[in-house]
Image (tube, grey):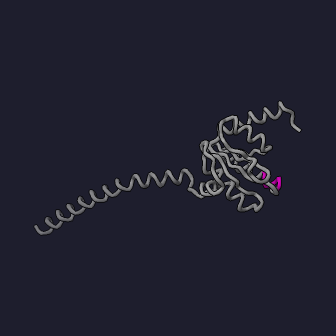
């Protein structure tokens, strides 16, 4: 059993994590083996994230301390939170894949930029392409008109060369 001082320290640490995070995903980890949870933690660490487990009341106090109106009491099961400090999509992708591989692990919701997300929204977020892929698509879209212009200008020069060659052949 934690003392009041220990509980307040845990709440402070959680509040700091909630302030620093780009995404926080709540999940029910009931029935997940220790080795599987260690695998999840290692995967999150590679993606600049972490997985924390504590009592629902302590999560609620930490959320209240930073001004987010969300109660974990209405969430079912044993609650764990995956914090993502880098890419916002990567932790969602990792947890979605983990929940497919482990039937007892369930995504319950999340917080993205201070906005509370439902389970369906977190799953939809996990289906987005990675940041690098999206940036590549954006660059391709931006370069498309330039490519078209170069092709058109090159076509005019090719046509001029063809006409000049035909004139030369006739003389």
Residue appearing at x 78%, y 60% in the figure:
104
Q: Name above or below for residue 42 compared with residue 96.
A: above
- Give the percent coordinates (x, y) of residue 54: 79, 43
Instruction: List the single residue furthest toward the bottom.
Output: 170
Residue appearing at x 87%, y 33% in the figure:
3
- Give the percent coordinates (x, y) of residue 66: 67, 35
- Give the percent coordinates (x, y) of residue 20: 65, 37
Main SS type for the magenta part?
helix
Q: Is 13 contained in the magenta span? A: no
Quadrant housing residue 113: top right
Closer-to-camera residue (54/151): 54
Left or right, 106 with respect to 128, comes to right
Left or right, 109 with respect to 11, comes to left
Quadrant housing residue 10: top right
Quadrant position of the C terminus in the picture = bottom left
Q: Name above or below for residue 132 compared with residue 18.
A: below
Instruction: List the single residue furthest toward the left.
Output: 171
Residue appearing at x 63%, y 47% in the figure:
116
Q: Name above or below for residue 100 compared with residue 50.
A: below
Q: Name above or below for residue 144 compared with residue 111.
A: below
Quadrant housing residue 12: top right
Quadrant position of the N terminus in the picture = top right
Total numbered labels: 0
Magenta-drawn segment: 33-37
- Give the percent coordinates (x, y) of residue 85: 64, 42
Closer-to-camera residue (66/162): 66
Instruction: List the single residue furthest toward the top.
Output: 5
Residue appearing at x 78%, y 32% in the figure:
9
């Amino acid at each position: 059993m934690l003392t009041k001082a220990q509980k307040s320290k845990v709440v402070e640490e959680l509040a700091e994590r909630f302030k620093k995070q780009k995404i926080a995903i709540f999940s029910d980890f009931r029935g997940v083996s220790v080795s599987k949870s260690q695998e999840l933690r290692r995967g999150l660490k590679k993606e600049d994230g972490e997985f924390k487990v504590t009592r629902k009341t302590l999560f609620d106090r930490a959320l209240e301390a930073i001004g987010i109106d969300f109660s974990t009491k209405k969430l079912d099961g044993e609650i764990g939170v995956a914090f993502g400090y880098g890419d916002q999509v990567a932790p969602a992708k990792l947890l979605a894949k983990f929940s497919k591989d482990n039937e007892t692990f369930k995504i319950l919701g999340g917080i993205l930029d201070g906005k509370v997300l439902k389970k369906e929204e977190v799953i939809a977020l996990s289906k987005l392409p990675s940041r690098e892929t999206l940036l590549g698509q954006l660059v391709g879209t931006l370069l498309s008109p330039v490519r078209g212009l170069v092709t058109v200008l090159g076509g005019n020069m090719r046509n001029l060369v063809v006409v000049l060659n035909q004139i030369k052949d006739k003389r």
